[in-house]
Image (cartoon, helix red, strand yellow):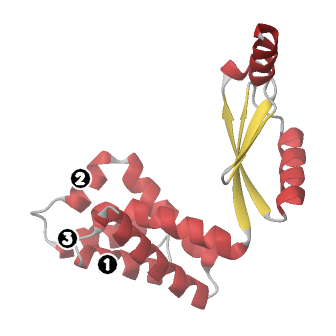
Protein backbone atom coordinates (compact mmCIF):
# COMPACT_ATOMS: atom_id res chain seq x y z
CA UNK A 1 0.00 0.00 0.00
CA UNK A 2 1.16 3.52 -0.81
CA UNK A 3 2.93 5.29 2.06
CA UNK A 4 0.67 8.35 1.73
CA UNK A 5 -2.45 6.18 1.99
CA UNK A 6 -1.11 4.55 5.15
CA UNK A 7 -0.31 7.97 6.63
CA UNK A 8 -3.69 9.39 5.64
CA UNK A 9 -5.50 6.49 7.32
CA UNK A 10 -3.37 6.76 10.45
CA UNK A 11 -3.90 10.51 10.87
CA UNK A 12 -7.54 10.34 9.77
CA UNK A 13 -8.21 7.71 12.43
CA UNK A 14 -6.36 9.75 15.07
CA UNK A 15 -8.48 12.88 14.54
CA UNK A 16 -11.59 10.68 14.33
CA UNK A 17 -10.85 9.18 17.75
CA UNK A 18 -10.34 12.63 19.25
CA UNK A 19 -13.57 13.95 17.70
CA UNK A 20 -15.53 10.88 18.82
CA UNK A 21 -14.22 11.29 22.36
CA UNK A 22 -15.34 14.94 22.33
CA UNK A 23 -18.71 14.13 20.68
CA UNK A 24 -17.90 16.53 17.85
CA UNK A 25 -17.80 14.29 14.77
CA UNK A 26 -20.01 16.58 12.66
CA UNK A 27 -18.34 19.86 13.67
CA UNK A 28 -14.86 18.39 13.20
CA UNK A 29 -15.88 17.15 9.76
CA UNK A 30 -17.11 20.62 8.79
CA UNK A 31 -13.91 22.24 10.08
CA UNK A 32 -11.56 19.79 8.37
CA UNK A 33 -13.49 19.98 5.08
CA UNK A 34 -13.35 23.80 5.23
CA UNK A 35 -9.55 23.72 5.41
CA UNK A 36 -9.12 20.87 2.88
CA UNK A 37 -11.44 22.59 0.39
CA UNK A 38 -9.54 25.85 0.74
CA UNK A 39 -6.30 24.01 -0.01
CA UNK A 40 -7.81 22.09 -2.95
CA UNK A 41 -9.31 25.23 -4.49
CA UNK A 42 -6.37 27.58 -3.98
CA UNK A 43 -3.17 26.44 -5.67
CA UNK A 44 -1.19 29.33 -4.14
CA UNK A 45 -2.22 28.29 -0.62
CA UNK A 46 -1.40 24.66 -1.39
CA UNK A 47 2.03 25.60 -2.77
CA UNK A 48 2.70 27.88 0.21
CA UNK A 49 1.78 25.26 2.83
CA UNK A 50 3.81 22.55 1.09
CA UNK A 51 6.84 24.72 0.25
CA UNK A 52 9.95 22.93 1.55
CA UNK A 53 11.98 26.09 2.28
CA UNK A 54 9.38 27.98 4.32
CA UNK A 55 9.67 27.56 8.07
CA UNK A 56 6.87 25.61 9.76
CA UNK A 57 6.11 28.51 12.10
CA UNK A 58 5.32 30.76 9.12
CA UNK A 59 2.98 28.11 7.71
CA UNK A 60 1.32 27.58 11.10
CA UNK A 61 0.88 31.32 11.56
CA UNK A 62 -0.79 31.50 8.14
CA UNK A 63 -3.16 28.66 9.05
CA UNK A 64 -3.95 30.40 12.31
CA UNK A 65 -4.70 33.72 10.59
CA UNK A 66 -6.90 32.05 7.99
CA UNK A 67 -8.81 29.58 10.15
CA UNK A 68 -8.49 30.25 13.91
CA UNK A 69 -11.82 32.07 14.09
CA UNK A 70 -13.56 29.51 11.84
CA UNK A 71 -12.56 26.12 13.28
CA UNK A 72 -12.27 24.40 16.65
CA UNK A 73 -8.91 24.70 18.41
CA UNK A 74 -8.48 20.91 18.27
CA UNK A 75 -8.68 21.01 14.45
CA UNK A 76 -6.07 23.76 14.29
CA UNK A 77 -3.84 21.75 16.67
CA UNK A 78 -4.27 18.72 14.42
CA UNK A 79 -3.11 20.83 11.47
CA UNK A 80 -0.07 21.94 13.47
CA UNK A 81 0.86 18.33 14.29
CA UNK A 82 0.51 17.36 10.63
CA UNK A 83 2.69 20.36 9.72
CA UNK A 84 5.31 19.46 12.36
CA UNK A 85 5.58 15.94 10.96
CA UNK A 86 6.00 17.26 7.37
CA UNK A 87 2.84 15.49 6.26
CA UNK A 88 0.72 18.43 5.12
CA UNK A 89 0.76 17.40 1.45
CA UNK A 90 -1.35 14.40 2.55
CA UNK A 91 -3.78 16.52 4.61
CA UNK A 92 -6.68 16.46 2.08
CA UNK A 93 -6.46 12.65 1.92
CA UNK A 94 -6.46 12.51 5.74
CA UNK A 95 -9.67 14.54 5.70
CA UNK A 96 -11.24 12.16 3.18
CA UNK A 97 -10.52 9.20 5.47
CA UNK A 98 -11.82 11.11 8.47
CA UNK A 99 -15.07 11.96 6.65
CA UNK A 100 -15.60 8.31 5.69
CA UNK A 101 -15.09 7.18 9.30
CA UNK A 102 -17.23 9.98 10.72
CA UNK A 103 -20.09 9.17 8.37
CA UNK A 104 -19.93 5.54 9.39
CA UNK A 105 -19.79 6.52 13.05
CA UNK A 106 -22.83 8.80 12.69
CA UNK A 107 -24.80 6.27 10.62
CA UNK A 108 -24.65 8.48 7.54
CA UNK A 109 -24.19 7.31 3.97
CA UNK A 110 -23.54 9.36 0.88
CA UNK A 111 -25.65 8.75 -2.21
CA UNK A 112 -24.65 10.18 -5.59
CA UNK A 113 -27.61 10.66 -7.90
CA UNK A 114 -26.84 11.24 -11.56
CA UNK A 115 -29.78 12.35 -13.66
CA UNK A 116 -30.33 13.61 -17.18
CA UNK A 117 -31.85 16.82 -15.79
CA UNK A 118 -31.47 18.45 -12.37
CA UNK A 119 -33.90 17.04 -9.80
CA UNK A 120 -36.44 19.37 -8.22
CA UNK A 121 -36.20 19.90 -4.48
CA UNK A 122 -39.23 17.67 -3.86
CA UNK A 123 -37.85 14.91 -6.13
CA UNK A 124 -34.49 15.03 -4.36
CA UNK A 125 -36.15 14.86 -0.92
CA UNK A 126 -38.40 11.96 -1.95
CA UNK A 127 -35.43 10.07 -3.38
CA UNK A 128 -33.35 10.81 -0.27
CA UNK A 129 -36.16 9.51 1.97
CA UNK A 130 -36.54 6.33 -0.11
CA UNK A 131 -32.79 5.62 -0.08
CA UNK A 132 -32.74 6.24 3.68
CA UNK A 133 -35.62 3.78 4.11
CA UNK A 134 -33.79 1.15 2.03
CA UNK A 135 -30.39 1.56 3.70
CA UNK A 136 -31.55 2.35 7.23
CA UNK A 137 -29.08 5.24 7.33
CA UNK A 138 -29.26 8.99 7.15
CA UNK A 139 -28.47 9.99 3.57
CA UNK A 140 -26.41 12.87 2.25
CA UNK A 141 -27.55 13.32 -1.33
CA UNK A 142 -25.13 14.64 -3.94
CA UNK A 143 -26.47 15.39 -7.38
CA UNK A 144 -24.82 15.28 -10.78
CA UNK A 145 -26.26 15.90 -14.23
CA UNK A 146 -25.31 13.74 -17.22
CA UNK A 147 -27.37 14.33 -20.36
CA UNK A 148 -26.06 11.05 -21.82
CA UNK A 149 -28.52 9.23 -19.56
CA UNK A 150 -31.33 10.63 -21.78
CA UNK A 151 -33.83 10.29 -18.91
CA UNK A 152 -34.16 8.64 -15.52
CA UNK A 153 -31.25 8.45 -13.09
CA UNK A 154 -28.58 6.33 -11.44
CA UNK A 155 -27.94 6.15 -7.72
CA UNK A 156 -24.57 5.15 -6.27
CA UNK A 157 -24.69 4.27 -2.56
CA UNK A 158 -21.42 2.85 -1.31
CA UNK A 159 -20.59 -0.03 -3.65
CA UNK A 160 -24.21 -0.41 -4.85
CA UNK A 161 -25.48 1.06 -8.10
CA UNK A 162 -29.14 1.43 -9.02
CA UNK A 163 -29.47 2.21 -12.72
CA UNK A 164 -32.88 3.46 -13.79
CA UNK A 165 -31.62 5.43 -16.76
CA UNK A 166 -33.25 5.43 -20.17
CA UNK A 167 -29.80 4.92 -21.73
CA UNK A 168 -29.37 1.60 -19.87
CA UNK A 169 -32.90 0.52 -20.80
CA UNK A 170 -32.17 1.28 -24.46
CA UNK A 171 -28.89 -0.64 -24.27
CA UNK A 172 -30.73 -3.61 -22.74
CA UNK A 173 -33.40 -3.48 -25.43
CA UNK A 174 -30.74 -3.23 -28.15
CA UNK A 175 -28.90 -6.27 -26.72
CA UNK A 176 -32.13 -8.30 -26.68
CA UNK A 177 -32.93 -7.33 -30.27
CA UNK A 178 -29.45 -8.39 -31.43
CA UNK A 179 -29.90 -11.94 -30.08
Residue bearing mark 2 = 47
Quarter-wise, where is residue 76 in the image?
Answer: bottom left
Can you name the residue that lies furthest to the bottom here? 21
Q: CA distance from mark 3 to mark 1?
A: 11 Å
Residue 58, which numbered label?
3
Residue 80, which numbered label?
1
Q: Position of residue 124 (x, y in %)?
A: 83, 43
> Of 80 and 61, which appears nearest the observer?
80
**Dot 2 lies on which element?**
helix
- Looking at the image, do the residues carrying marks 3 and 1 touch, with CB atoms under 8 Å apart? no
The residue at the point 60 percent across, 74 percent down is: 27
The residue at the point 19 percent across, 73 percent down is: 56
Q: Position of residue 60 (x, y in %)?
A: 27, 73
Residue density around tag 3, few if under 14, some if 14–19, many if 20 or more, within 10 Å:
few
As drawn, 72 above or below 143: below
Q: CA distance from mark 3 to mark 2?
A: 13 Å
Q: Position of residue 178 (x, y in %)?
A: 76, 8
Q: CA distance from mark 1 to mark 2?
A: 17 Å
The mark lying in front, picked from 3 and 1, is 1
Residue density around tag 1, few if under 14, some if 14–19, many if 20 or more, within 10 Å:
many
As drawn, 134 above or below 58: above
Image quadrant holding the C terminus, namely: top right
Quarter-wise, where is residue 102 in the image?
Answer: bottom right
- Dot 3 or dot 1: first in sequence order is 3
- Dot 3 or dot 2: first in sequence order is 2
The mark lying in front, picked from 3 and 2, is 2
Quarter-wise, where is residue 168 in the image?
Answer: top right
> Of 12 and 6, which appears nearest the observer?
6
Image quadrant holding the N terminus, namely: bottom left
Amino acid sequence: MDKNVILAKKYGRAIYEIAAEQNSLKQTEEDLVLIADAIRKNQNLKDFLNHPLLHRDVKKDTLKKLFADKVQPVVLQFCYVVMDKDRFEVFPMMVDYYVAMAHEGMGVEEAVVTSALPLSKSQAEALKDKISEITGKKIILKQKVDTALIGGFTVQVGDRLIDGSVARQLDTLKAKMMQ
